Amino acid sequence: MKKMRANYPPAFKAKIALEAIKEDKTTSELASQYQVHPGQIRNWKAIASNGITELFIGKRQKADQDKDELIEELYRQIGQLKVELDWLKKKSGINT
């Protein structure tokens, strides 16, 4: 019989990740306290450490990032449409 994977709520993961970041206890101590694999705690700690910087990104930076992504997507679409137009011109025999 297969053992089902444990599914932990986000609040639980955040609590353990914060304790791991504090480094008051070792990963193995936290693992035995909460009955979670030490590797999982390291993963949650890394996710929390990497994701925390996004909390402090200003609205202006986020808007600039969204704007850049939109521009990139629009250029991609323009390129795709140009290729399709050239193909249609070639197939129909229209020379411009």
Image: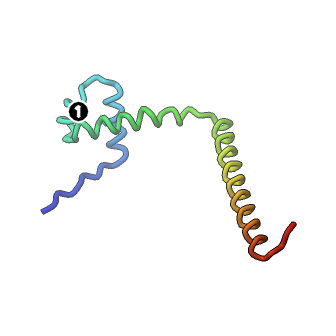
Compare residues 88 and 35 and report the one nearer the observer.
Answer: 88
* Residue 89 in picture, x, y percent from top left: 78, 71
Residue 69 in the image: above or below residue 95: above
Q: Identify which residue is drawn at 76% across, 67% down.
A: 85
- Quadrant of residue 66 within the rendered picture: top right
Quarter holding the C terminus is: bottom right
Give the side of residue 39 with respect to residue 63, left or right: left
- Quadrant of residue 27 within the rendered picture: top left
Q: Residues within 10 Å of mark 1 (few under 14, many from 20)?
A: many
Give the side of residue 81 with respect to residue 42, left or right: right
Query: Looking at numbered disc 1 in the image, what kind of residue is underneath it?
Result: Leu
* Residue 52 in picture, x, y percent from top left: 47, 34
Name the residue at the right extreme. 96
* Residue 77 in picture, x, y percent from top left: 69, 58
Compare residues 52 and 39 and report the one nearer the observer.
Answer: 39
- Quadrant of residue 68 within the rendered picture: top right
The residue singled out by tag 1 in the image is: 30
Q: Identify which residue is drawn at 53% across, 36% down.
A: 54
